[in-house]
Amino acid sequence: MLKHLWNVDLRSHRHAGAECNLGKLRCDTQGCLYIADPVEKAVHKFDSEGNLRMRFSGRGNKNLRQPQDVAIDGRGNVFVADSSLVGVVKFSRSGRWEGSFPTEVPPIRIAIDHEDSLYLHALTPQGLLHKYTSQGARLFSFCRGLNAQLTARIRAPGLKHRGVYPDYLNDVGSVEVDSRNRPYFAPKRIYHVQRFTPAGRPTLSFRRRIRERPVTVIVDAKKDVAWTIVTLDIAISKNQNRLYVLRARLREGRSLVDVWSMKGEYHKELLFDHPANSIACDHRDNVYLLHTNMAQGTASLLRYSLSRHFTNGS
């Protein structure tokens, strides 16, 4: 059974009236948690017990504008992907602005490997990933055409006009890096996590065929199709060599997490009673879920222990 350790109401740490629109949840090697806040233009840092330790956004004329995601290196430096600045901002572990560099496209997601190479994902029609050094030198781009290939496979059963999602190419994906410096990319509308070599060559895919019927929803007074199960985020347990794929049951208000080995072997499905938008895990096999709901004005950070849920490394 999953052990629920604590739940933090994030509204108490944000300005009154702020929209509950938060970015990716991240965890560093010390077990501290980071949440990018594009509404308050800041990054929140919590310890492993859910206590707020720091809130930084810059100083003077050097301030964040729309932080979407963070990546933390082995020394505790924080790299922030800011889509409004169209670049990456570096902070020290104490929250001091260390510098910034521009990127070719507005970054939405960011990850860092053990060699301090940065992997950026942006809302581009090609679904590209961009690799940079931590000093801002662009190395190369890869993953070209992956979104287009996956989009062609998406169909809507039961609809009069079969087709693809028109906005699929603009979905925010998830980017992670494992202990061997291999980047992972997961689009949001389809269950397909792709692993690459550090040179950008695809090596392994993590896929599950989930048979779920689509439901009709109203978006901007127009009918659209939504799947009851979508891939929301991924996280990697670097010590346990496991990949967690977060997906949600929109009808039930629950979260499902699929557990994979790094060899591409599917292990099991974990069911959480709380809905979640983002997932992170630490070196002690604790899982953290971030849930935000702009319509209801709620924002929560939850911690679960999985140590009793796995035996013999399975």
Image (cartoon, helix red, strand yellow):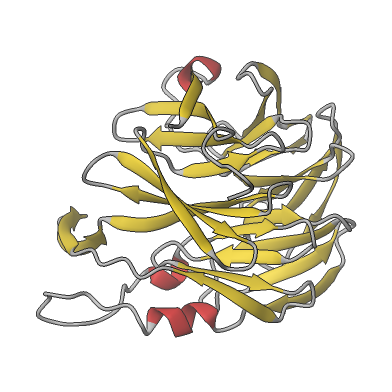
Q: Is residue 18 left or right of residue 87?
A: left
The outermost residue toward the front is 312
Label tally: 0
Residue 38 seen by the camera: yes
Residue 9 seen by the camera: no
Residue 210 vs 74, above or below: the answer is: below
Residue 121 vs 276, above or below: the answer is: below
Q: Residue at x 44, y 72 (%)?
A: 169
Q: Residue at x 56, y 31 (%)?
A: 40
Asked which quadrant contains residue 160, the reply is: bottom left
Q: Residue at x 62, y 53 (%)?
A: 242
Residue 176 vs 30, above or below: the answer is: below
Asked which quadrant contains residue 1, the reply is: top left
Q: Is residue 313 left or right of residue 214?
A: right
Residue 238: percent from the left, percent from the top?
A: 72, 50
Q: Nearer the viewer, residue 106 or 251?
A: 251
Residue 297: percent from the left, percent from the top?
A: 35, 27
Residue 266: percent from the left, percent from the top?
A: 50, 62
Q: Is residue 36 left or right of residue 16?
A: right
Residue 93: percent from the left, percent from the top?
A: 84, 31
